[in-house]
Image (cartoon, coloured by chain):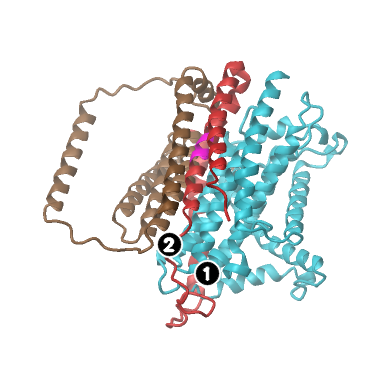
Amino acid sequence: MSNELVFSAIALLGIAFIVPLLMIVTGVLGPRVGGKAKNEAYESGIQHVIGLADQKFSVKFYLVAILFLIFDIEAVFMYPWAVALRELGWFGFIEMVVFMLLLLAGLIYILKKGVLNWR
Amino acid sequence: MNVPLPNADHLVGIVFLIMIGLTITGGVIACNANRLVRAVAGLVVCFVGVAGLYYFLNSPFIAMMQMLIYVGAVAVTISFAIMFAAPEESKKHGPPGTLAGPFGLITAGLLFGGFTLLALKTDWQVHAKINDGSVETMGKLLLTEYAMVFELISIVLLTAIIGALIIARRGRSS
Amino acid sequence: MELTLLNVVIAVTIAIGFAALNAAYLVWAERRGAGRIQNRPGPNINGPLGLLQPPLDGIKLMAKQLIIPGGADKALFIAAPVLAMAPAIVSFVTLPFSDTIIAHNLNIGVLAIFAFASLGGISLLFAGWSSRNKYAVMSSVRAVSQAIAYEIPMLVTVITVVLITGTMNLMEIVEAQKGGIWNWYFFPFTSGLYNPLMTMSFLIFFICALAETNRAPFDLGEAESELVAGFHTEYGSMGFGLFFMGEYANIVIGSCLTTLLFLGGWDAPLPVLSFIPGVVWFLIKIYLIIATIIWIRWTFPRTTIYGLLNLSWKILIPLSLFNLLLTAGLLKVV
């Protein structure tokens, strides 16, 4: 078993133990007073007039999330390429150019369609 | 003071088991939660568990990809979709039909039996190390041997971009 | 170095201690700096120069009640702050501070830090969503879409550095920049490669680092003039404390990464000065960057959420992609 894994195991266990400890300490030390008004959500003094926490958002936020997903995958694929570029020669470079231009075309298409035009 | 790591292998084994536990618990929470927030949280726990499994199986790059793409992007996309589409939370479905229970049990039993059979019947071969599994080797293979796959990925992603755009535009017109 | 239990425990303890200490005293530095910029004293009562303020604040936070609002999802509400702080500490374990001071040298160090950062991003979503407060929900959606928008140019820009060095190991990246200020990647003129594009990479990276850590002028997540206090509106006591510490820990991580990737890490600016240990240089560099970040916060007004998203999607992402292509081409030609 490699040392790296052993180290990671100990570090993860330690951190998973210590950080929640802070929350537990505050739960033990802090007072526990309840009350209807105290437990209400903070709405700047206005009680549930303008709408609850459930509200609809612009669909653009969702679109941004999907676009992020796509570009995230793209970026992660570029890392192995970047590490190996020196040994790949021109063929590897041109492959990546094609890969990137395709996605760049997608981005430009989206920008031209004006979907990301926020008010 | 040079205390060697006590039972280091066991410790890694325990953390590996914890990761398996996280994966299964996360999956169960994601399926059974009443509140949508909890379901997404269960999904995140499951993803983190899977990333941990990859890491402790000696492929840290895949583990980090799992974290970046699944926890960072897929979970966010799913939660945005839920938040935007269905604000009225925890709307319970009616009681499941009488057949749901037995059918579920039968399906689960069949699947379990099938997989067990498959696992027992397969002639497992332990491969010698194919390559060193480093990112550099991965990059080289990706752009030489699997170049076609690599370029197809970009087309799939382009299609996804256009698909996302169509969804968004339909959302606006309605 | 032989791996012993003692070494591991010491390394992890130092990482946690460094994160906590920095988080605490950066709050002090920020408040003092803000005071100086706004021509007021800032915290100066407790201890000399107000230096006792952070520990007292910590004790106060711990002794307060963690109020869980009635509609909130209790388990997630408590888990979210932990999820915000823990990944930051895990990142600290993988950061090298000098050629000898490193807890855990990971071969894919750069990517690991981004991976943990994405876990921190989702904690904001849980914080806002589980507290069932209108402002918190709005703020968490904003904060997350901001974080995801700026993660792409950041990831793409870092690839330029990986291209030049051919490795994702942070220590090797610093080793490649050794030999004085003219070899650092923010403007390398010698080191066998004249590449003015790296300055652009550095700028893009720094802007993204500001946005990723939710810092002004990009602190739309907690725009207090619109959203009360953002995603931690409902949090009191240590719940708030952990979010706060997480934010400052992320700032430190951001400046560490900037230093390691573009400013030569622990390399002395002039080879003559290399008798001073590397850690000192490294700390000087990260604190200079942090000072700049604080200075920027109190100098520039907040942008709008739309302006923020447009900046990323319309300018930074295409720019970073072109930058990467040109850098790769340059590397191939030279």
The kind of residue on which mark 1 rests is: Tyr
Q: Is residue C296 above or below residue C94?
A: below
- Helix, strand or loop at label 2? It is helix
Prevailing secondary structure of the magenta residues: helix
The quadrant where residue B86 appears:
bottom left
Label 1 chain ID = C
Element on which disc 1 rests: loop
Per the rendered image, the range of residues in magenta is: A70-74
Q: Is residue C209 left or right of residue B11?
A: right
Q: Which residue is mark 1?
A: C235
Q: Is residue C153 magenta?
A: no
Q: Earlier in the sequence, mark 1 or mark 2?
A: 2
Among the chains pictured, the one given red colouring is A
**Considering depth in this image, is C99 or B41 the residue closer to the camera?**
B41
As drawn, the chain in brown is B
**Up-down: is C165 above or below C123?**
above
> Which quadrant of the figure has residue C273?
top right
Front in this rendered view, residue C93 or C296: C296
**Which chain: cyan?**
C
- The quadrant holding residue B3 is top right
Residue A108, image x, y percentages: 57, 37
Which amino acid type corresponds to the residue marked 2 in the rendered image? Answer: Leu
Residue picked out by circle 2: C76
Question: Which residue appears at 82% of the width and 36% of the height?
Answer: C181
In the shown orientation, is residue C232 left or right of residue B32?
Answer: right
Label 2 chain ID:
C
